[in-house]
Amino acid sequence: MELRLEVIPNNLGQVVLHGYFKENSDLKNELKFEMESDQSFLSSSLKDLSKFVKHYGDSKGIKI
């Protein structure tokens, strides 16, 4: 499993999160994403991303 995350801040207190998630390195499918946030919401943005990975993060798909 591979999760890459790049956080790019600007001088106005905002951040842009760029990244991708890939479960199996042998396959070509990957999820690319971008999230814009205020620095004060960075923690909650990362928690939301963690929930997403827990829900979709294996080769079996959605966990019910």
Image (cartoon, helix red, strand yellow):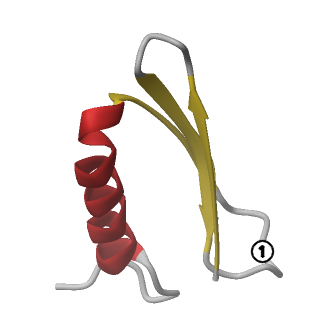
Identified at 30% across, 48% down, the residue is: 45
Instruction: Classify mark 1: residues with Cα within 10 Å, few (<14), some (14-19) or many (20+).
Output: few
Q: Position of residue 56 (x, y in %)?
A: 38, 73
Location of residue 8 with respect to 25 vertically, above or below: above
Identified at 23% across, 51% down, the residue is: 44
Q: Nearer the viewer, residue 37 or 61?
A: 37
Q: Is residue 10 left or right of residue 1?
A: left
Element type where label 1 sits in the image: loop
Q: Position of residue 36 (x, y in %)?
A: 41, 27
Q: Nearer the viewer, residue 64 or 42?
A: 42
The residue carrying mark 1 is 27
Location of residue 9 with respect to 58 vertically, above or below: above
Identified at 25% across, 39% down, the residue is: 41
Q: Is residue 54 left or right of residue 20?
A: left
Location of residue 42 with respect to 2 vertically, above or below: above
Q: How many marks?
A: 1
Q: Amino acid at mark 1?
A: Leu
- Based on the displayed image, in which of its 4 quarters is residue 49 positioned? bottom left
Location of residue 25 with respect to 39 vertically, above or below: below
Identified at 47% across, 86% down, the residue is: 58
Q: Position of residue 25 (x, y in %)?
A: 79, 79
Q: Pick the quarter of the image with the N terminus.
A: bottom right
Q: Nearer the viewer, residue 23 or 38?
A: 38
User: Which residue is outermost to the top?
Assistant: 12
Q: Position of residue 47 (x, y in %)?
A: 27, 62
User: Which residue is outermost to the left?
Assistant: 64
Q: Is residue 18 left or right of residue 49?
A: right
Q: Pick the quarter of the image with the C terminus.
A: bottom left
